[in-house]
Amino acid sequence: MDRPLRLITANPVDQLARTVEALLVVASAPLSVEELAQATDDDAVRIETALGLLSDRYREGRSGIVLEHVAGGYAFRASREAAAACGRLFERPVERGLSQAALETLAIVGYLGPCSRPEIARLRGVAADSAVAGLLERGLIAEAGRDDGPGGAVRYRTTPLFERVFGLENIAALPRLDDLGESAAEIRERLHSVAVGKTA
Amino acid sequence: MTAVFDLPLDLDAFEGPFDLLLTLVLKEELEPAEVDIAAIVTAFVERLAEKDQLDLEACGEFLVLIASLLELKARALFPDEDAELSELEPEEAAEELARRLAEYRQMKDAAAWLTERLAGERERYFRVGPSPLAPRPERTMAAQDPQQLAVALRALAEPPPPVSLSHMGLRFPPVAQFLERFRAVLSRRRRFDFDAEVGGLNRVEQAVAFLALLELRKMGEVALAQAEPFAPIRVSRADSERGAEWIVRSA
């Protein structure tokens, strides 16, 4: 008896995953779900499903390429087990030789940005020109408008490259500022305790 | 605790550890203006030199403290220079110092966290570079009416209205021409009326003629007279007008 032929097709999400995979290979910066949805002319929920499939396929221990959620989007990177080989062939110019001053400046811009050089200098107590210029050149910070008022200083913010270099999903992934450092009260108390102890 | 606070000092106004000096200044028992800041810095630098390793923690703390002390001294020396700062009481200054130290400590810790994070991410390699350019949106025109297109093209084919260059056509006759002319007139007559002489000329020529007249007056060849403003200008040979009754008005 003749049976009607059944068309065997691939899972539509799997097909979408292949397109997303191709887009991520072409891109050199993380692509957001919205960007992927726009490029594939598909909806965000299906894109996330496709990304789930790809994340499972491209993960540490299973593939030399790893799909990661970073800098507000998705991007491929080399697996950690390939790092030594990558290190013999490729340079990491963005983060190489970042000085303490540059890292402090980067932290200030990351937490307080957009902020200007005078604000950075006030916090660090030294001129920030050199550190800011170096971070701009590396692409870790970028200009973000000017301060209000006459002669407004240029303000700076961190870039998606900063998040990617430090492996942050987004800027909110930085530790809470309240969890860092001592409070003013603690410092004041410490200063006074030492001073009073000596005078007593 | 760093080695800043127990730094021994031997100054003209004070002898003892650094933290005691700070306390006395904050309690207003010692005038900041009397404190020799340079001597404190020298003492600290000497102490640093004694050690094999540079204590960055101590250096940072010392810099903040000495800067605050310097600020207090500057305010004491120039009380009216900065109204905002001069309003700060010693306790407020201490609070401000603690607040600034706390802010800096937070950022220093954040930088340490970034350093640690960077070390942990050392094995991450990814492509860095500009993204391929997004394609430009294609612009397609809607269906057009051929008649309208013809009208538009015809309008474009129309020669533009000629631009008037009349204002560029002004020709200024040379002043020398009128110099010669007036000299010739005066060789025939002792005097003449300027307005009558140039009456038939256009405005530009009249202006040039007047310049020539002034030139002749400047060279002393003619004498000019005018009974009243806007009255006819009488021109006469200079030698013939000596002693004349006309009032000569130089240009």
Image: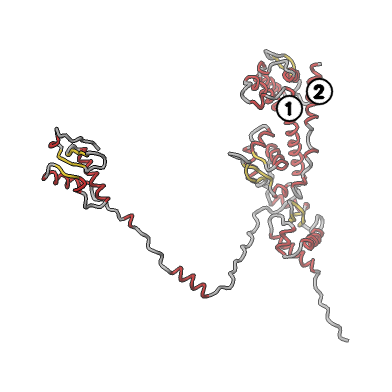
Quick check: can you spot residue B25?
yes
The disc numbered 1 marks a residue on which chain? B
Vertical arrangement, residue A143 with respect to residue B85, above or below = below
Quadrant where the N terminus of chain B is found in the figure: top right
Q: Are marks 2 and 1 on the same chain?
A: no
Quadrant where the C terminus of chain B is found in the figure: top left
Q: Few, some or many C-alpha atoms within 10 Å of disc 1 (few <14, some 14-19, many ≥20)?
A: some
Q: Is residue A41 left or right of residue A60?
A: left
Residue in view at x 72 percent, y 55 percent: A30
x%, y% of residue A63? 79, 58
x%, y% of residue A184? 77, 31
> Most extreme residue toward the top, as rendered?
B12
Instruction: Please tell me in which quadrant of the rendered image residue B189 appears.
Output: top left
Three-letter residue code for mark 2: Ser
Q: Few, some or many C-alpha atoms within 10 Å of disc 2 (few <14, some 14-19, many ≥20)?
A: few
x%, y% of residue A74? 75, 56
Q: Which residue is mark 1?
A: B58
For the residues labelled 2 and 1, say whether their Cβ atoms are less than 8 Å apart.
Answer: no
Q: Secondary structure at mark 1?
A: helix
Q: Is residue B195 left or right of residue B82?
A: left
x%, y% of residue B96? 73, 28
Q: Nearer the viewer, mark 2 or mark 1?
A: 2
Instruction: Please tell me in which quadrant of the rendered image residue B21 appears.
Output: top right
Three-letter residue code for mark 1: Ala
Q: Which residue is mark 2?
A: A193
